[in-house]
């Protein structure tokens, strides 16, 4: 996990240098927070993560908890406020994901380490098997075979994580956020199951982000 330690240090440096970025509530066509393929952790760890996130002093920012906690497999499209059930792209996403998940077992990750970064705070998700990588490759191939271009444009994800906070306004307490992350840098949540992949649509609730399920692909081999 040395790479994660380097990532954490780069994030600390960026925040302390005043280089934080922030999200804004979504509008039609916004490149962030469109439909995505995600996996949500299962079990008591969800409550533990929720309780930890609630201790961050981050007024005005999006602090995540409960079902909003997730690992992103792939971002798919710019933001749309309405994605109908019969939408052709939605059907393509769901079919591609179901095919990718077919025959795969649950993914398992080791959740450990809190890190700040320019846009927020996250916990590292370190895969202990090949399921996530296999699912990622299959899903990308299935989208391509259907002529669907997503927002990743060939990007290969080489870091997995669960976000606890997204900054939603200019950051005014960078030193406090960094100190909190330092205090929890060695947080260890152990092995965590990711039992299904989903296509979700994000919704801004007014103070946070919610991920509404559009399609579900269980990992059940």
Image (cartoon, rainbow, N blue to C red):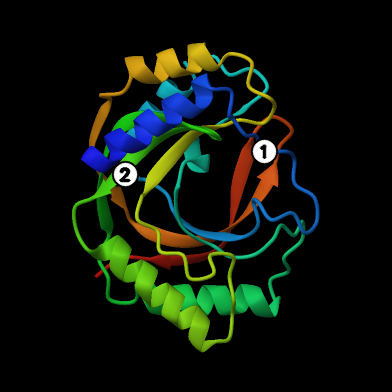
Q: Find out whether the residues at labels 2 and 1 contact each other: C-beta distance under 8 Å.
A: no
Query: Could you tell me which quadrant the N terminus lies in?
Result: top left
Residue 98 showing in the rendered view = no
Q: Residues within 10 Å of mark 2 (few under 14, many from 20)?
A: many
Badge 2 is on which residue?
125
Seen as rendered, the residue at the extreme front is 17
Q: Residue at x 30, y 39 (%)?
A: 4
x, y percent for residue 174 = 54, 17
Depicted 39 relative to depicted 23: above or below? below
Q: Residue at x 25, y 24 (%)?
A: 186
Q: Residue at x 63, y 39 (%)?
A: 209
Left or right of 97 in this view: 137: left
Q: Nearer the viewer, residue 40 or 28?
A: 28
Element class at badge 2: strand
Badge 1 is on which residue?
23
Q: Quadrant of residue 196?
A: bottom left
């Amino acid at each position: 996990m040395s790479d994660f330690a380097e990532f954490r240090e780069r994030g600390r440096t960026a925040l302390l240098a005043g280089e934080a970025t922030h999200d804004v509530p979504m509008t039609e066509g916004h490149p962030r927070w469109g439909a995505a393929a995600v996996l949500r952790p299962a079990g008591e760890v969800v409550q533990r993560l929720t309780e930890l996130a609630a201790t961050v002093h981050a007024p005005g920012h999006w602090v995540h908890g409960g079902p909003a906690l997730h690992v992103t497999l792939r971002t798919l499209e710019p933001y749309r406020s309405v994605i109908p059930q019969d939408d052709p792209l939605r059907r393509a996403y769901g079919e591609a994901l179901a095919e990718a998940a077919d025959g795969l077992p649950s993914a398992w990750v080791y959740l450990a380490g809190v890190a700040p970064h320019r846009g927020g705070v996250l916990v590292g998700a370190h895969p202990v098997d090949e399921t996530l990588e296999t699912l990622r490759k299959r899903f990308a191939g299935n989208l391509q075979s259907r002529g669907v271009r997503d927002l990743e444009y060939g990007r290969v994800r080489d870091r997995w994580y669960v976000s606890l906070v997204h900054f939603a306004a200019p950051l005014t307490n960078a030193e406090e956020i960094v100190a909190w992350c330092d205090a929890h840098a060695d947080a260890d949540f152990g092995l965590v199951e990711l039992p299904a992949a989903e296509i979700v649509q994000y919704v801004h609730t007014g103070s946070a982000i919610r991920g509404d399920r559009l399609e579900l692909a269980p990992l059940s081999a």
